[in-house]
Image (cartoon, helix red, strand yellow):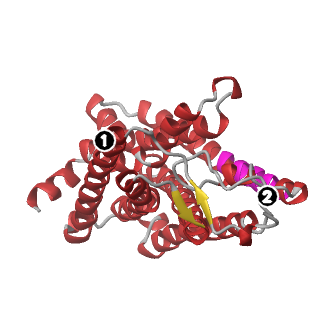
Amino acid sequence: MSNSSSMPQFLLLALTDRRELQLLHFWLFLGISLAAFLANGLILSAVACDHHLHTPMGFFLLNLSLTDLGCICTTVPKAMHNSLWDTTTISYTECAAQIFFFVFFISSEYFLLTIMCYDRYVAICKPLHYGTLLGSRACAHMAAAPWATGFLHSLVHTANTFSLPLCQSNALGQFFCEIPHILKLSCSHSGYLRELMILMFSVCLAFGCFVFIVFSYVQIFRAVLRIPSQQGRHKAFSTCLPHLAVVSLFVSTVTFAYLKPLSIYSSSLDLVVSVLYSVVPPALNPFIYSLRNQELRDAIRKM
């Protein structure tokens, strides 16, 4: 095949060849997606309806739930369809759309988690300036920045990836369309290097956000340890633990997925890791936040 436009479809990697296990995967994905829809839907409704949650953290949590729903809707439905109907095909247009929206929502979520870290830093380290630094207009701008950055980030990656000529085959070693697996099909050395440079820029940007998160939490922990009362320290820690848990889950799974040693590579492990970073965090995030947030739990109980 001379170029990507002549490739009508791609072949995704089947989760299993046994029909019984394919149906099991379908029901597992269905259960995970329903749990994610229910949990994130409850958080969206609770934040929208309960005035006690009309805070900067509540507003950012609403945006986080939207990115989680977007991640689930991008990858899981096609995987469920393929498992149910015993097929592995995905059209060229569907693959491009899947990559665009997946990179968009994943990028937006990571940038949003960085913004939420700043919210926790101001709330604990600069509580007297919280209303000034995180007013309604500032929160709107801070929430819009991850969405806009994620959109541009996704647009650049998708446009560059699908401008490459693909001549190896049309088989992807993944259960959803992913940029590294499409790059393996490319026969353009210059285009491949160009995409690698864009990926390196993305890695540097992500690392910068990670450094900001680590630095913020160092300052947060130093401020919390200076609180004289044990009850005050416990309350301060409890407001940070959900965000810290979500960031740790997200960063650890994505890092292992893309930076795992080649010596331990296998298609089965690759599938498991992909599920861990693309499906599990969006489903677990609302449960992590609701476990440690008393106001959120009370609002959900009322609903």
Instruction: Please say if 233 is above or below 37.
Output: above
Instruction: Give whichever of discs 2 and 1 has the lower sequence position.
Output: 1
Judged from this view, the residue extending furthest toward the right is 190
Q: As rendered, which of 261 and 163 lies closer to the eye?
A: 163
Mark 2, other Cα within 10 Å: few <14 / some 14–19 / many ≥20: some
The image shows residue 192 at horizontal and vertical percentages of: 83, 55
Image-based side of 127 in relation to 166, left or right: left
Tags 2 and 1 touching, CB below 8 Å: no
The answer to if 128 sits in the magenta stretch is no
Judged from this view, the residue extending furthest toward the bottom is 137
* Amino acid at circle 1: Leu
The residue singled out by tag 2 in the image is 167
Q: As rendered, which of 42 and 86 lies closer to the eye?
A: 86
Image quadrant in which the N terminus is located? bottom right
Instruction: Please say if 59 is above or below 294.
Output: below
Q: Residue at x 52, y 32 (%)?
A: 268
The image shows residue 18 at horizontal and vertical percentages of: 39, 38
Image quadrant in which the C terminus is located? bottom left
Image-based side of 12 in relation to 71, left or right: right
Q: Residue at x 26, y 55 (%)?
A: 34
Q: CA distance from mark 2 to mark 1?
A: 35 Å
The image shows residue 88 at horizontal and vertical percentages of: 50, 54
Q: Label 2, secondary structure: give it.
A: loop
Q: Label 1, secondary structure: give it.
A: helix
Q: Residue at x 46, y 55 (%)?
A: 87
The image shows residue 296 at horizontal and vertical percentages of: 22, 54
The magenta-colored residue range is 194-207
The residue singled out by tag 1 in the image is 24
Q: Main secondary structure of the magenta part?
A: helix
